[in-house]
Image (cartoon, rainbow, N blue to C red):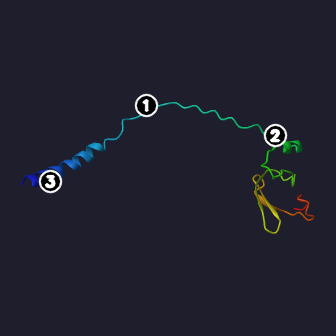
Amino acid sequence: MRLLKITLLSGLLLPLCAAHAQRGLPPKEKTRSVSITKYAQHLDFLPEMVKLLKAPDGWEVSIAASGLGKPRMMYMSPSGHLYVTRRDGGDVLMLTDRDGDRKFEEL
């Protein structure tokens, strides 16, 4: 009998506790936030900048193509074509190295 009373009492109290827990958090104080965004200064490309790039031992950095605008992504295909996407142009260019000197002469 006592076990039955405890079971009934806990059965009634659990929903009340759950309802009491749903009151939520007190409202937060309003805060004011100020953001200052500083963008990096844009520099036009100069060939001398290549010397400033660092590469791991055994790797080399060189200019393979120029005058492409603002290239964004590159993909070297198994056939040797270099595909370049341009953000401003919204297109994909296929560059070809005809003489194997690692400089792409042909669009």
Q: Quadrant of the C terminus?
A: bottom right
Query: What kind of residue is marked 3?
Result: Thr
> Which mark sits nearer the N-terminus, 1 or 3?
3
Give the label, 2 or 1, closer to the camera. 2
Query: What kind of residue is marked 2?
Result: Leu
Give the label, 3 or 2, closer to the camera. 3
Q: Residues within 10 Å of mark 3 (few under 14, many from 20)?
A: few
Give the label, 1 or 3, closer to the camera. 3
Residue 69 falls left or right of residue 33:
right
The location of residue 4, given as percent across then percent down, is: 10, 55
Q: Residues within 10 Å of mark 1 (few under 14, many from 20)?
A: few
Inter-mark Cα distance, 1 to 3: 43 Å
Tell me if label 2 and label 1 are in contact, CB under 8 Å: no
> Which mark sits nearer the N-terminus, 2 or 1?
1
Query: What kind of residue is marked 1?
Result: Glu
Disc 1, SS = loop
Relative to 38, does residue 79 appear above or below in the rendering?
A: below
| Mark 1, residue position | 29
The location of residue 6, given as percent across then percent down, is: 13, 51
Q: Residue at x 26, y 47 (%)?
A: 18
| Mark 3, residue position | 7
Inter-mark Cα distance, 3 to 2: 76 Å
Relative to 30, does residue 81 appear above or below in the rendering?
A: below
| Mark 2, residue position | 43
